Image (tube, grey):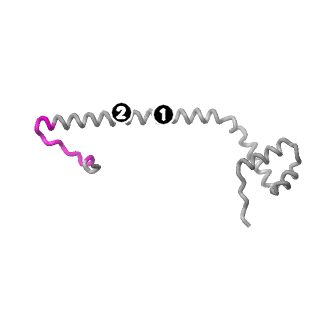
Amino acid sequence: MSRAKYSAEFKSRIVLAIIQGDKDFNTICSENNLNPGMVRKWRIEFLKNAHKAFDHEAELKSAQKGEENLQKVNDQMLKTIGQLTLERDFLQSCFRKIGHPVPSIPEYDRQK
């Protein structure tokens, strides 16, 4: 016999029905063919994590701040890459103008 897997939404509905008290605990369990011990664990878990329902905004702000920081780092890296590319191109053109061969950069050549 395989174990039944219940969605978080289903568990929440069952626990909320128990908390609201419209029906007896055992009635709710028997109507839904659920083990009372398992439902007690769901209730404990639900109550233990109830504060997270109000933390969503703080988590969202934290995630947005982290994303902004990553964007700043990314922008700085792109700026540095652009600057280095301009400097390399300038130096290569200077070497060409004076008639010297452009120095080879082994790592760069391998990527072509």
> Residue drawn at (82%, 45%), measured in percent from left and top?
17
Q: Is residue 42 left or right of residue 86?
A: right
Q: Is residue 75 left or right of residue 1?
A: left
CA neighbours of label 2 inside 10 A, class few (<14), some (14 to 19), many (20+) = few
Residue 52 place in picture, x, y as percent: 68, 39
First in residue order: circle 1 vs circle 2: 1
Residue 92 place in picture, x, y as percent: 19, 38
Q: Report which residue position mark 2 lands on.
A: 79
Residue 45 in the image: above or below residue 54: below
CB atoms of marks 1 and 2 within 8 Å: no
Which label sits in the foreground, 1 or 2? 2
> Residue drawn at (76%, 42%), measured in percent from left and top?
47
**Disc 1 residue type?**
Asn
User: Image quarter for residue 89?
Assistant: top left
Q: Secondary structure at mark 1?
A: helix
> Residue drawn at (32%, 35%), measured in percent from left and top?
82
CA neighbours of label 1 inside 10 A, class few (<14), some (14 to 19), many (20+) = few
Q: Report which residue position mark 1 lands on.
A: 69
Q: CA distance from mark 1 to mark 2?
A: 15 Å
The circle drawn on residue 95 is: none
Residue 16 place in picture, x, y as percent: 79, 43
Image quarter where the N terminus lies is: bottom right
Q: Report if residue 107 lies within the magenta region.
A: yes
> Residue drawn at (84%, 41%), measured in percent from left and top?
20
Magenta residues, start to end: 95-108
Q: Is residue 58 left or right of residue 104?
A: right
Q: Is residue 99 left or right of residue 2?
A: left
State the residue in front, 25 or 97. 97
**Disc 2 residue type?**
Lys
State the residue in front, 79 or 44. 79
Q: Report if residue 56 lies within the magenta region.
A: no
Q: Secondary structure at mark 2?
A: helix
